[in-house]
Amino acid sequence: MLGVFFQKLTLVFKDETLRNRVLFVLGALAIFRVLATIPIPGVDVLRLEEFFANNQFLGLLNIFSGGGLSNLSIVMLGVGPFITASIIMQLMTVLSPKIKAMYQDEGEAGRIKFTQWSRYLTVPLAFMQGFAFLTLLQQNGIVPTLGFTAMMTNVIIIAAGSILLMWIGELVTEFGIGNGVSLIIFAGIVASLPTAVSQLLFTFDIAQVPLYLGFIIAAIAVTAGVVFITEAERPIPVTYARQTRGSRQQGGVSTYLPLRVNQSGVIPIIFALSILLFPQVVATFFVNSSIPYVAGIATAINTGLANNTIYGILYFIMVFFFTYFYTAMTFDPNRIADNLQKNGAFVPGVRPGGHTSEHIGNILTRITLVGALFLGVIAVLPIIMQGITGIATLTIGGTALLIAVSVVLDIVKRVEAQISIREY
């Protein structure tokens, strides 16, 4: 196994084009990590650590910021605004037939225009999120109270950092290997590992060795499960009808249509996180309101979401719901059935057209149930592990693990494809 790995690694660095792509990715990620270490001025580090330790939402947001939020760096928003903009544009494909046609029917040109609109939308979202986070941090005493000029200057710096990361991510996608935005998030996850390991070593208790061994076994099992579900597919057999053209016969080939068990990836977790975060941010603004009724509601919302049990149940339900929602939004069985019929293909034992669409839809509904339950468990896994072990540092970050495994598998596939092309 190791021999095959080193053989592939040697082929990567022997090929000039592939080597340059890998080095470009490493250089871009190094620049990102340097930017993530430059904090905004006047940060109370102790209050910041306490704030993050008691807030599950900001811990998850820190994942999607690539680790820049935990030390309030100039790239503290990370690629969050771009991800939010992409989600909004995806939702607009449901609400606007024109945008849906541009995304699905205009091919590569339509997707380029769709991505460009997402970039434009990222700019106002970066300013809004930067202002909201600075206000939230001021209310919690983590940053000093800023005047108008200082506030606007910091908002501009933070928004510019987010837009810069979006640009770096686009460059990595174009000139590197893999999706640039995913790689930035992955780099933040990997960069946080030394801190997590050091915290565990400092709190190490020899009496809890069996607990640590159980944790390692659970971590290996969860990683294997993530890989299995991420790669799992349900093949639907498809046969192309035999056609006679002159003296030649074409078709009659049997193949299959792969339906992924986890069709929506990590998107439902991001959707659920955004929905759960919004009321908490709004409630934080009104918790000190002069109106007792408003302050009471805001305090109740914050107290409820601070409860791990309530938070975990709501998070699981929303991830489950959004898995079905996003799958229905991005995968259209009617469209697949029409394309099969136009190309002279059919599912054996199923009539073309509406019956094929219904057959594919029924299979998709059943396998999405597995994917939705899987994503829901992955999302609340850190809370479950913390409840079982009672140790805050001894948790398996489900969302981070899912992103990391997905990124690694994607990079491995892309590298192997590049190597295969050059070998042949």
Image (spheres, rainbow, N blue to C red):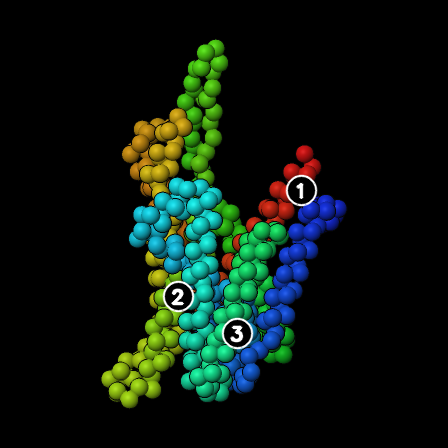
Residue position for label 3 = 157
Q: Is residue 209 above or below residue 257?
A: below
Where, by quadrant of the figure, is residue 168 drawn? Answer: bottom right
Q: CA distance from mark 3 to mark 1?
A: 41 Å
Pointer 1: residues within 10 angstroms few (<14), some, or many (20+)? some
The residue that mark 1 highlights is 419
Q: Amino acid at mark 1?
A: Ile
What kind of residue is marked 3?
A: Ile
Residue on which the image places disc 2: 274
Circles 2 and 1: CB distance less than 8 Å? Answer: no
Where residue 40 sits: x, y (%)? Answer: 55, 79
Label 3 environment density (alpha carbons within 10 Å; few <14, some 14–19, many ≥20): some
Q: Secondary structure at mark 1?
A: helix
323 over 287 or under it: above or below: above
User: Farthest residue toward the top?
Assistant: 247
What residue is shown at x 40% (from left), y 28% (from top)?
343
Dot 3 or dot 1: first in sequence order is 3
Q: In the rendered image, which quarter contains the C terminus? A: top right
